[in-house]
Image (cartoon, rainbow, N blue to C red):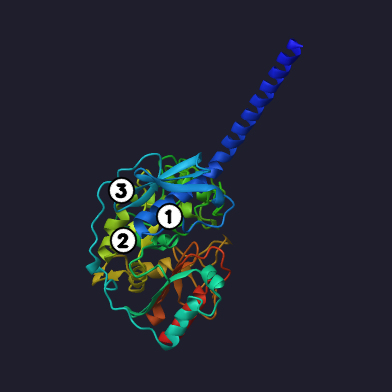
Amino acid sequence: MRRRGRLWLRVLSGVVALLLIAVAGGYLWIRPLLRTGTGYAAHNACALATIAGRPITEDLPPNPLVPYLRVAADGAGYRASVLGFLAGQRAWPVEGFGCTVGDSPPDFGPATVIDPANNPLHDQPTPAASGELATALAHAFGDDLAPEAREQLGTRAVLVVSDGRIVAERYADGFSAETPQLGWSMAKSVTSLLTGVLVAKGVVTIADDHLRPEWTDERAAITVEDLMRMRSGLAWDETYDLGTPITQMLYDSTDMAGFVASQPLAHPVGTSQQYSSGSTNLLCNVLQARSGQGPDLPRKELLAPLGLSSAVFEADPTGTPVCSSYLWMTPRDWAAIGQFALDDGVWNGRAMIPEHWIEQTTTARTPASHEDLNYAAGWWTNRQSDGSLLYDAMPADAYWASGHDGQKLFVVPSQRLVVLRLGFSPSAEDIRDFQLLVDASAAVG
């Protein structure tokens, strides 16, 4: 009887051991996926608290993992985990550089001081919109909708600038002209401008290739322009989901550019256009290498000369700016980016980018294989590469910066018009952004 009991005890111990191994193995398999979620939550909490001054639990996307996330200030940083103990990640605030996800606080050195006096939009008076402009703003904010639908629309700021003057401006409750907002992929358009600044200084050319020392294969043919136009051919998946390349890069990679550079070619260089945030982060790393500058590069070379004093360009742990996604600014500073592009890179009487740079980078030239006929070099265009218009109702020469969750910065050269829409609209089917441009365009004539 005693032997039989000992036998059952051994069997039970073996079963428990196998279950523990299975659970541990399952966790190790799913942990990288969970870390992309906790990395997002940690960074979001840190940035909202230290840059935007807003509650750390806001702006989490609709995702099955969200109810199980636990987010809190943790010492000098912000920690997120699943159920309080699984796949934990931390984000650390760095003065002038926002927040960085990593195991320890980074040291990026001092950030260039920015004088807001260099931005003519910074202290312009707030106009009282009336007539067609007031109607355009009311529609953009969903004044005609029920409260629940208006919240889903998620508009937080609208700014209209005509010939360098703010003619309409409105903010949602809890937001103001002083609230920095995340532009997401609008940062790619800013990176296009930054590249132009460095081209004008002779630091880099768009034809430069052999961009990474480890690229001794066909990837050596990738040029700066290939990265700008997203035709590098590197394998990529821009789907925002747990464990995809885009979320792995942003939330579980200590070296984002290295992660992107390690991807194999999925297409011959230059033959296929595929939207890739990885391309832009790799581009910024190349700009750093060619200029010999660190995470302060965008701030020193572009943001400070424009007087964008609210601007915070966040970096990864290696100090490479996350040029695909992580630029925060107040609406007026975002609008100044549009005005700088509208003025062909001339700011306060100083030409900062090469002549025709804006024309070239806002002209779509997609190869035969493509995802987007209207993607140029960091900007989206109404006139597509086949000559057709994407939206007939919009001015033919309109181009824009576009970001995740409903960010838009429109520029219309023929009307000397800049229109900005910022918000949080992850589930809205129509964020009324293009209609805003059509309405504002009609209102200013």
> Few, some or many C-alpha atoms within 10 Å of disc 1 (few <14, some 14-19, many ≥20)?
many
Residue mark closest to the camera, 2 vs 3: 3
- Tell me the kind of residue under disc 2: Val
Q: Position of residue 191 (x, y in %)?
A: 38, 59
Q: Is residue 185 above or below residue 209?
A: below
> Few, some or many C-alpha atoms within 10 Å of disc 2 (few <14, some 14-19, many ≥20)?
many
Residue under label 3, please give it. Answer: 294
Residue under label 1, please give it. Answer: 56
What residue is at 50 percent from the left and 68 percent from the top? 154
Q: Position of residue 185 (x, y in %)?
A: 45, 60
- Tell me the kind of residue under disc 3: Gly
2 or 3: tag closer to the N-terminus: 2
Q: Nearer the viewer, residue 198 or 242?
A: 242
Residue under label 2, please give it. Answer: 197
- Could you tell me which quadrant the C terminus lies in? bottom left
Q: Is residue 315 above or below residue 17?
A: below
